[in-house]
Amino acid sequence: MAVVMLTGCTPNQQQYKINHENPSLWQKFLVIPMSELLDWFKMLLGNYGWSILVVTFLVRLIVFPLTWKQQQSSKAMQELQPHIVKIREKYKNNQQKLQEETMKLFQKHNINPMAGCFPMLIQIPILFAFYQAIMGNEHIFTSDFLYLELGQPDPYYILPLLAAFTTYLQFIATGAADNPQTKVMLWIMPIMIFLLAYQFPSALSLYWVYGNIFTVLQYLIFFNKKKVKGNVSEGTAR
């Protein structure tokens, strides 16, 4: 989702310049508040690099309930994959029966196959607004963080490599690499992210790396803990 969203964008600050005098509803209620939040934390912390870190954390915290629901749906679909494969093999020559048996399987386990998509669709405006808030904030593009000029790509390719590596870790940590349907993306996504981060301003690459790290930590703290408890309960029942 993020790759599709960002590949449609160009790293041109003027394209996303915020019109404070006559803002659109999109800018007024989403982009400008996020941009002002970045400015406020910059004044508090003294640097936009740390400001992006804090605001990324807040954004991920806000969308966490959606992430939780999406992950639960994804895990449920992964668990049903062996059964779905068997149904496909059994009724490969009868599409109507295939659809009927698949829907019966979903109903039996009380799973909505579209449930994982709705939270993602809700997250897109929030994440895209944050993207525009960074792109449209002219102060960020004249600021430094560590060795970086936040308005320019990383000259040493460290951030693009980190963006690619943390994307890879995210696939491993969330179990997406275990799903045959998404396994191919384990290698394609990091490469695509590296190519994007290679040309995008460091502020955006920094946001991407922060976001990946938070996603991995969220999964390790919450989702894996739940999975371990479930396994323990099953073992006790046996």
Image (tube, grey):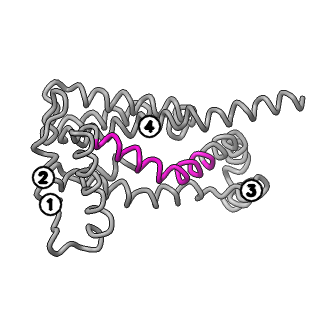
Check disc 3 and report the residue beneath it: 110
Q: Which mark is residue 17?
A: 1
The quarter of the picture where residue 17 lies is bottom left
Q: Amino acid at mark 2?
A: Glu
Left or right: where 235 falls relative to 176: right
Q: Is residue 60 within the magenta segment?
A: yes
Left or right: where 120 falls relative to 222: left
The residue range painted magenta reads 51-73
Q: Earlier in the sequence, mark 1 or mark 2?
A: 1
Q: CA distance from mark 2 to mark 4?
A: 26 Å
Q: Earlier in the sequence, mark 4 or mark 1?
A: 1
The percent position of residue 131, horizontal first and vertical second, equals 28, 52
The quarter of the picture where residue 167 lies is top left
The percent position of residue 53, horizontal first and vertical second, equals 33, 40
Badge 2 vs badge 4, beta-carbon distance below 8 Å = no
Q: In the displayed image of the protein, which residue is found farthest to the front?
A: 44
Residue at 36 percent across and 27 percent down: it is: 165
Check disc 4 and report the residue beneath it: 214
**Element type where label 1 sits in the image:** loop
